[in-house]
Amino acid sequence: MAEPEITIESKKSKLPLIIGAAGAVVVIAVVAFFFLRGGSSDHADTAKTEHAATEKKPDVKAESGGEGAKSEIGDIISINELVVNPKNSRGGRYFVTSIGVVCTSKEQSDEVKKKEPILRDRLITFFSLQTMEVLTDINRREQIKTYVKAIVDREVATGPVKEVLFSRYIVQ
């Protein structure tokens, strides 16, 4: 009778391994889906950005109240599909985000486009240093936006950007 108990225990010890392997396969499939989907939607995002750039934008009076002081809102530049494993997740969890950078001028939007690889690197590093608790806490979302804006502002020499927006924010 002792043998069946040993056999049952060894089957139970394999169960978490099988569940973990199945979970890993699901995570890999989802991440692969996002990467494959991201490559095909780049053309649509580029077309939208180009359309927004050619669209006539109204002038908005500056908040300083100066007479005739006007500023033009620039383009929104997308940094798509940032995928990272959060800190202490051991590869079992992931975070996906896409960020829109609201520029204040055409020169600034050109610079943000030019520096996108550097910005992607800095943002991936930032997000991978965050824990799941930080990324999933809705009360910290504005604080995360503030940090992301500071990262972008530090890299852009034409002055601070107007705002950063999350167009995708997925924690899995």
Image (spheres, grey):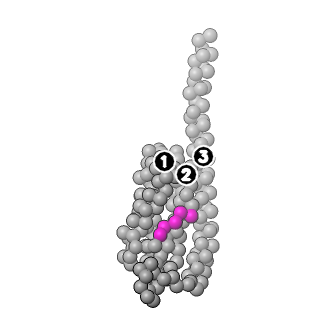
Residue 57 placement (x, y as % from top left): 56, 83
Q: Point out the tag, 3 or 1, that comes first from the N-terminus.
A: 3
Name, please, the residue furthest toward the top.
1
Residue 76 vertical placement versus 71 (above, below): above
Q: Amino acid at mark 2?
A: Val
Disc 2 crowd rating (10 Å Cα; few below 14, some 14-19, many 20+) is some
**Which quarter of the rendering shows the N terminus?**
top right
Quickly name the residue at label 2: 171
Q: Amino acid at mark 3?
A: Val
Q: Residue at x 62, y 62 (%)?
A: 37
Quickly name the residue at label 3: 25
Disc 3 crowd rating (10 Å Cα; few below 14, some 14-19, many 20+) is few
- Distance CA(mark 2)–CA(mark 1): 8 Å
Dots 2 and 1: beta carbons under 8 Å?
yes
Residue 7 placement (x, y as % from top left): 60, 20
**From this viewpoint, is residue 1 visible?**
yes
**In the displayed structure, does residue 52 sit left or right of residue 116?**
right
Residue 117 placement (x, y as % from top left): 45, 69
Tell me the SS state at disc 1.
helix
Residue sitting nearer the eye, 170 or 11? 170
Tell me the SS state at disc 2.
strand
Quickly name the residue at label 1: 132
